[in-house]
Image (cartoon, grey):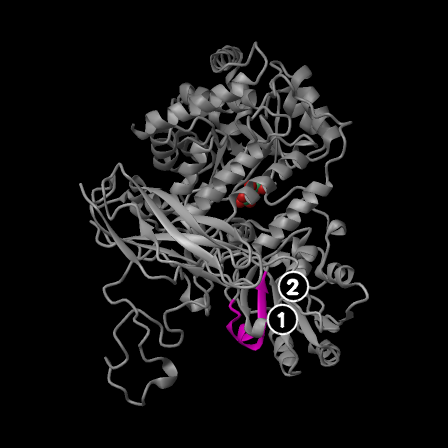
């Protein structure tokens, strides 16, 4: 079945399911389309352009009401007061000529009130159900104030931790991001868009934004069509398949074309190839920013290019409402194009049930920080934490440890552990590690708290001394370091990923006490902490873990929970290695790890004596940690995988079985990963690609078979002829605990 038919059928099924649960009159797709047609016939051009105009809530209520009355806006972002939302909605329903409801939008990225770990942390769980649950809870909390649309998930693939927005996405891998993005959409949108607590999701940023040059936000990208299709587009296609209601364009220009003016991606790929039937919103002012890009001459030109490219709704820059009437008059934009945009917007409003139920119930019970929400946020923080190192089984903390020094600027920083892009989270509800640990250990363990530094960028080293004094009195040191929330997120990019301020000095000073040192890192991205890892006996990487980070970390440290997170992206040793990612293509001269590194180079060495391979003299080839890496308190033993067949055809499904045994002393969960390499292609192919993963809980000593089904069709890629094809030939397959381990076994695809 070709893609268009497949996705059209999928979408129709989706519409059918959602309509089936709705009330008779407006409730089937046909009726919705009829309603939309009837409405569009009644609309003036100005009213149509009003629907395509999204404004912020920053105006006063009178000004907002006037705009709504005149039908000049279809959506308002950033209003979170249910009373104001209802008041504005009442104006739309009762005082505007056609009574079209307003769609209220907000960035609900990793929680509304109850804050979950940053999406990059959630990705480390390799648990789509956890992501779905987090999104569902966020939707329940956000919809309770009247928000019906979130600008999430961000499914931009990024291989650059300098980019501040790395925190907001699911990391470097196409498959992991596709799965997590779809799970998140399911969570936000619920079983049906018109559910009371459902909110429309938005797949953003379309497309390539995570590949901005040098990791500098808003920068250009230069992604070939093949790279786009093989790596960057699949999560967005998966989002369409998951029924996402909306898409957002990205700020970057790719190969010279800003996404907001790129008809190829918005029309040819998104709508024609994938059959997307929702609507596309620009990013914040990305329509008018096409002028700054030098892609549009003025507002009129920008509006024309964006509308004709397929951007249905303009976020805040107001060029549509100002210019599009003249553009239609001058035949530069067809009224039918405007009608199509409005149709797509109205369809989502109908599907959300806004015409029938435009108001939010203001007397419903408060759902914020409900016990089950906090429990889910805690579980998410537990599963997001990655144990990077654990020498001599320093962790979990043993019962003979009676005095603990808690040090570091992140130990009791309620705002900083929430992470980036939390507009509505409140630090007053955060449970910090310091408080949670004190509660957990009670009088059993003496806690000496001496932060050493006030915040992550603190350069005042005088306070390190009391921290060292405290550490010297303790049996074990817990050092909480990392970065404040503000150091990651939009426009918060860094050229240096070492620990900020004097944190590194703090770790060195603590190490010098000779006491066992456990370093806990809370950050919005992978940091280059090779030295600090060497100095620590154990390292737990928690990203920004959200509201319940404290209790989650306390339980992990004391072994009430066992770490199971795996790196959702490669951790580089040095910034200069970026982009470092596991699924790179091979060079003609791959690194072989026997190269001569900087400190071993003889004086006046011959030019070719060092190994003519792809590596750095000062950093070698390998990263600090590969993608998919993470330890446990227990150990797992992998058997040799068996394949249902070693010779398969395109329509076959390969079954892979492997025996996994928990060979240690703790009940724990392992994330089993299946990678495949297409050994020879019509274009060069990645050395490995993740194709499946599974969280497998095993009791101490238990063993079981893990089985994966892999349709051979999923080995297709965009080949030399730019066709999506499975190419017959040999493939390597690994079932492994990370992207760097395991021995490959081979199978063949035959035509
Ligand atoms: C960001 C989007 C966000 C929008 C609305 C922009 O600056 O790039 O991701 O959804 O603002 O807040």
Q: Nearer the viewer, residue 123 or 277?
A: 123
Q: Quadrant of residue 442?
A: bottom right
Query: Is residue 654 positioned above or below 642 on the image?
Result: above
> In the picture shown, does residue 61 fall above or below 90?
below
Q: Which mark is residue 552?
A: none
Q: Name the one closer to the observer, 659 or 648.
A: 659
**Which residues lie in the magenta part?**
528-541
Q: Which residue is mark 2?
A: 557
Q: Residue furthest left?
A: 751
- Quarter of the figure with the N terminus: top left
Residue 653 position within the rendered picture, expressed as x and y whole percent measured from the top left: 31, 40
Give the labeled residue for mark 1: 518
Q: Earlier in the sequence, mark 2 or mark 1?
A: 1
Picture coordinates of residue 354 (x, y %)?
61, 21
Q: Residue at x 33, y 71 (%)?
A: 615
Judged from the image, the secondary structure of the residue bearing numbered disc 2 is helix
Query: Is residue 405 toward the left or the right of residue 292 in the image?
Result: right
On whether ligand 1 comes within 8 Å of the CB at mark 1, the answer is no
Q: Position of residue 617 (x, y in %)?
A: 35, 76
* Between 227 and 37, the one nearer to me in the picture: 227
Q: Is residue 691 left or right of residue 437?
A: left
Mark 1 closeness class: few <14, some 14–19, many ≥20 residues within 10 Å = many
Given the current orientation, which residue lies at the most extreme right position?
Answer: 443
Q: Are marks 2 and 1 in contact (CB under 8 Å)?
A: yes
> Which label sits in the foreground, 2 or 1?
2
Is residue 626 found left or right of 54 in the rendered image? left
Is residue 188 highlighted in magenta?
no
Q: Quadrant of residue 593?
A: bottom left
**Image point 33% across, 43% down: which residue?**
229
From the top left corner, tell me how far across and down residue 595 is, in percent: 31, 77
């Amino acid at each position: 079945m070709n893609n268009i038919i497949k996705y059209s059928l999928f979408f129709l099924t989706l519409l059918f399911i959602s309509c089936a649960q709705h009330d008779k009159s407006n409730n089937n797709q046909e009726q919705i389309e009829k309603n939309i047609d009837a409405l569009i016939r009644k609309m003036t051009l100005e009213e149509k352009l009003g629907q395509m105009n999204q404004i912020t809530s920053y105006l006063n209520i009178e000004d907002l009401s006037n705009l709504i009355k005149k039908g000049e806006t279809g959506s308002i972002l950033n209003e979170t007061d249910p009373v104001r939302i209802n008041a504005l909605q009442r104006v739309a329903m009762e005082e505007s000529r056609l009574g079209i409801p307003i769609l209220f939008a907000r960035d609900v990225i990793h929680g509304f009130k109850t804050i979950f770990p940053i999406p990059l942390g959630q990705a480390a769980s390799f648990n789509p159900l956890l992501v779905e649950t987090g999104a569902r809870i966020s939707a329940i909390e956000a919809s309770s104030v009247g928000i019906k649309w979130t600008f999430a998930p961000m499914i931009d693939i990024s291989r650059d931790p300098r980019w501040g927005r790395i925190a907001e996405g699911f990391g470097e891998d196409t498959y992991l991001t596709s799965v997590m993005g779809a799970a998140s959409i399911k969570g936000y949108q619920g079983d049906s868009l018109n559910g009371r607590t459902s909110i429309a999701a938005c797949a953003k940023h379309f497309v390539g934004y995570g590949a901005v040059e040098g990791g500098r936000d808003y920068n250009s990208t230069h992604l070939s069509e093949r790279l786009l299709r093989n790596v960057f587009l699949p999560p967005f296609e998966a989002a369409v398949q998951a029924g996402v209601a909306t898409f957002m364009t990205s700020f970057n220009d790719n190969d010279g074309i800003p996404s907001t003016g790129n008809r190829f991606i918005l029309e040819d790929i998104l709508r024609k190839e994938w059959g997307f039937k929702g609507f596309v919103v620009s990013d914040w002012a990305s329509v008018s920013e096409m002028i700054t890009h030098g892609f549009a001459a003025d507002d009129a030109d920008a509006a024309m290019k964006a509308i004709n490219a397929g951007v249905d709704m303009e976020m805040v820059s107001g060029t549509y409402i100002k210019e599009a009437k003249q553009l239609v008059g001058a035949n530069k934009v067809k009224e039918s194009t405007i009608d199509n945009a409005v149709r797509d917007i109205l369809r989502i409003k109908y599907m959300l049930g806004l015409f029938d139920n435009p108001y939010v119930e203001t007397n419903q019970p408060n759902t914020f920080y409900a016990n089950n929400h906090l429990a889910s946020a805690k579980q998410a923080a537990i599963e997001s934490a990655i144990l990077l190192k654990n020498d001599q089984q320093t962790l979990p903390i043993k019962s003979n440890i009676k005095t603990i020094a808690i040090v570091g600027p992140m130990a009791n920083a309620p705002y900083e552990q929430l992470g980036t892009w939390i507009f509505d989270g409140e630090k007053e509800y955060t449970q910090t590690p310091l408080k949670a640990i004190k509660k957990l250990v009670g009088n059993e363990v003496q806690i000496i708290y001496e932060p050493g530094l006030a915040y992550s960028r603190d350069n005042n080293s005088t306070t390190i001394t009391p921290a060292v004094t405290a550490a010297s009195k303790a049996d074990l040191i817990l050092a909480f370091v990392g970065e404040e929330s503000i150091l990651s997120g939009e426009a918060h990019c860094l050229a240096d990923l070492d620990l900020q301020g004097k944190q590194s000095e703090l770790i060195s000073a603590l190490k010098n006490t000779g006491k066992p040192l456990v370093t806990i890192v809370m950050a919005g991205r992978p940091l280059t902490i090779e030295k600090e890892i060497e100095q620590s006996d154990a390292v737990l990487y928690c990203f920004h873990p959200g509201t319940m980070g404290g209790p989650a970390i306390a339980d992990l440290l004391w072994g009430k929970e066992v770490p199971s997170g795996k790196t959702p992206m490669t951790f580089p040793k040095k910034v200069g290695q970026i982009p470092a990612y596991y699924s790179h293509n091979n060079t003609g001269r791959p690194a072989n790890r026997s190269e001569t590194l900087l400190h071993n180079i003889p004086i006046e060495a011959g030019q070719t004596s060092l190994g003519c391979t792809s590596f750095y003299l000062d950093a070698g080839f390998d990263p600090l940690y590969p993608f998919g890496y993470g330890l446990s308190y227990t150990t797992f033993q992998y058997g040799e995988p068996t394949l249902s067949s070693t010779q398969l055809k395109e329509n076959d499904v390969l079954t892979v079985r492997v025996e996994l045994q928990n060979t240690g002393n703790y009940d724990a969960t392992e994330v089993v990963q299946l990678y495949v390499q297409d050994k020879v292609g019509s274009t060069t192919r990645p050395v490995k690609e993740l194709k499946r993963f599974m969280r497998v809980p095993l009791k101490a000593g238990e063993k079981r078979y893990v089985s994966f089904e892999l349709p051979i069709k999923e080995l297709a890629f965009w080949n030399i002829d730019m066709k999506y094809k499975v190419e017959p030939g040999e493939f390597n397959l690994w079932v492994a605990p990370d992207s760097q381990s395991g021995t490959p076994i081979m199978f063949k695809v035959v035509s």
